[in-house]
Image: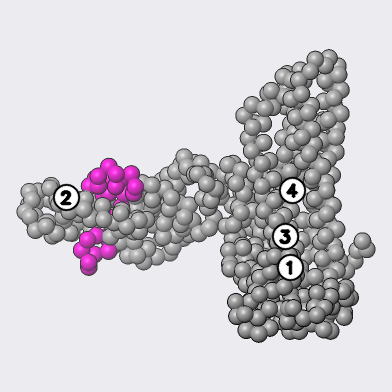
Amino acid sequence: MSDAEETKVCAALVTYVVLTEDEVLRRQAEDMAGVAEVLSIPAAFAAFLLRRYKWMPSNLQDDWFSDDRRVRDAAGLPADCAAPVVATALSPRPLVCAICFRRYPAGATRSASCSSHFYCNNCWRGYVGAAVGDGPRCLSLRCPDPACSAAVVRGLVDAVAGAADRERYARFALRSYVEESGGRIKWCPGAGCSLAVEFVGCARYDATDVFCKCRHGFCWSCGEEAHRPVSCGTVHAWLAKNKSDSESANWVLANTKLCPKCRRAIEKNNGCNHMSCPCGHHFCWLCFKPAGTQGHYACEGDVYRPATQRKSKESKEEATARQARASLDRYLFHYERWAGNLKSLEKARQDMDKLERSELEEMAAAVGIKAVTELDFVTEAYKEIVYGRRVLRWAHAYGYYLDPERDGKKRELFDYLQGEANSSLELLHKCAEVDRKDIFCSGGDSSKVMKKKVLKDYRIRMVNLTVASRTFMGNLVKAFESNLSEVYTMNF
């Protein structure tokens, strides 16, 4: 087995296709042309109809051949099947514009497909311009006459609109192929990305990740960043918690105590246990006795009491503060690691970009390799690092919602699997980031034989660490997808 085969990451079956804007435009044109040919209507009207059917030609054709009159009426097409369907018609005789009421010679006013209501080009330009300025709804524009439902389509817009409005209208028309596809195609939400993703498989109900060519990953189900194997519900709850102010209240409970006299919340900002409240009362931070009395610094607060004993002597307020402090500690523990893995993930992406731009070639030259493909194991390792960082990042969101008391066994299994995955990933990341630079960027005058031996040893170590990390991450993902049900069958 070759090194490339050994290091190839086993990916799930790809069920989506990434499309450029040109590919979207070409698909749109093909659908329009196909429907126009089958229904014997202009392509502009085919586009108007296809938008109503979420760009599904088969659904449109089924309805058309079942009851074409109903489809025509809904789209504002002429009811007379024998009459030619045109995007716009010029007046055959002198007419008065029904908007500005000026008289124009024959051919100087035009109508939509109704061929009944004629307006001058200036009024048409203003009418279309106002609609385009209103956004994508301009694609459903109708004849200005309130009683007429004739469609205003691309041919008419191109004939009367200014250059800027034509460009915006064309842009809306292109985007409609994605945004009105009924969810089959979506724009990549990555910053500055103009690519679209078409899902061609069967999306699961929850957490179906797709990855654009720009390297941004997002969940097809909820639109948030890729978070498999954590459920969309957990992600939404976690993000909402991060944005809310609820932790401020927890901080107050965890870091303050109430003055025994006025019940005002007091923060301890010095080392001394002598607290002075603005109301004038002085008390001990540990035992709440009035400060200054004999022996109050030797109170029970300085003596260790077992948890059971402390619990029996806790007041309701003390218990609330202790629980809030524990909840806040648990939240901060998981949040710091959630955010830390994001930073590591972003750094790994930056390293991958550098590798693709020039570093792989520089590395190959440093060790006397002619084919850059011999260093594919480095790229595969970074792919695994990015994947692992993403999994560990969202694992901490999942872990936060495991109640220490209610989900004690699950928590133990989670900590075990997460710890194994994290340890293996850290070793791989160090090998890829630190050890790689020591080998390829250290310079020196080593012989070719020595360089090849060092490279061989490094490749073997990197491949083994990649496989190990993939295995531990796979175990973690499987456990999450089954909601840690293995806890009832495993001993650890």
Disc 3 or 2, which lies upstream in sequence?
2
The residue tagged 1 is 272
> What span is in magenta?
143-169
Q: Which of marks 1 and 3 is in front?
A: 1
Of residues 349 and 312, the one nearer the viewer is 312
Q: Where is residue 377 in the image (x, y as percent from the top left)?
A: 77, 33
- The residue indicated by pointer 4 is 388
> Which is more toward the observer, 374 or 364?
364
Of the residues tagged 2 and 4, which is closer to the observer? 4
Q: Look at mark 2 in the image and give the residue it sits on.
A: 122
| Mark 1: secondary structure | loop
**Residue underneath mark 3:** 334
Query: Label 2 amino acid?
Result: Asn
Image quadrant in which the C terminus is located = bottom right
Counting other residues with Cα less than 10 Å from the Cα at mark 2, is it few (<14), some (14-19), or many (20 or more)?
A: some
Quote the CA–CA distance across marks 1 and 2. 82 Å
Of the two numbered discs 1 and 4 in the rendering, the one whose residue sits closer to the viewer: 1
Q: How many marks?
A: 4
Kindly state the secondary structure of the residue where label 2 is placed: helix
* In this view, 419 is above or below 484: above
Give the mark nearer the N terminus: 1 vs 3.
1
Using a 10 Å C-alpha cutoff, classify the residue at mark 1 as few (fewer than 14 neighbours), some (14 to 19) or many (20 or more).
few
Q: Where is residue 369 in the image (x, y as percent from the top left)?
A: 75, 20
Please, what secondary structure does the residue beneath circle 3 have? helix
Q: Which amino acid does label 4 sit on?
A: Gly
Which quarter of the figure has residue 102? bottom left
Figure quadrant of residue 409: bottom right
Tell me, for residue 361, which label it has, or none.
Answer: none
Residue 146 covered by magenta stretch: yes
- Quarter of the view holding residue 79: bottom left
- Give the answer, above or below, for where 380 lies relative to 487: above
Q: How far apart are marks 3 and 2 (CA)?
A: 63 Å
